[in-house]
Amino acid sequence: MTSNVSTRHEQPMSAYLALWNGADSNTDAVSESFVAYEPSAPGGEVHGPDALGAYVRELRTAFPDFTITPEVLLEDAETVMTEWRATGTHDGDFNGLPPTGRTFEHKGMSAFVIADGKIQEERMYYDPREIAEQLGFLEE
């Protein structure tokens, strides 16, 4: 699967992926009550479209080439599950960690709740220690 997401929820999912991949800064794909359970976010959560936009900008400043590539997608009427691969090069500060110039690649999974054409929630499942190890912050 490429950056175009083929799903009955194609519009919000494609727009959301474009946000993360830096192709668009628009957060219209998410609801006002949106929450992301994101292990690398401060406190592990991001609430609302403005906070999401700020978080993604911070992430993309630290990892300018950050890319998420969906690999497997399952869905029903209100849920989308996707397995994805993320890559990036650490060229700026992130969560207080100075740039290393090193790259990371890891796999994860996300569960989305979608209603009224908007993403209401995302729960991300991955091990942030895997990224920290690849960037040299943990002993390998």
Image (cartoon, helix red, strand yellow):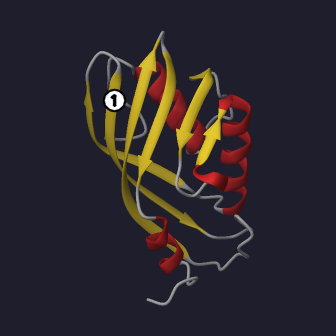
In the image, what residue type sits under mark 1?
A: Val
**Residue 54 x/y as whole percent:** 74, 43
Which quadrant does the C terminus fall into?
Answer: bottom left
Which quadrant of the view contains residue 42? bottom right
Q: Is residue 131 left or right of residue 78?
A: right
Relative to 76, say whether 68 is above or below: below
Q: Residue at x 75, y 69 (%)?
A: 96
Which is nearer the eye, 2 or 57? 57
- Residue under label 1: 80
**Residue 72 x/y as whole percent:** 26, 42
Which quadrant does the N terminus fall into?
Answer: top left
**Residue 114 x/y as whole percent:** 43, 20
**Residue 15 x/y as whole percent:** 53, 28
Relative to 88, say whether 134 is above or below: below
Q: Residue at x 33, y 17 (%)?
A: 8
Mark 1 secondary-structure assignment = strand
Relative to 93, say whether 39 is above or below: above
Which is nearer the eye, 34 or 82? 34
Q: Residue at x 38, y 31 (%)?
A: 5
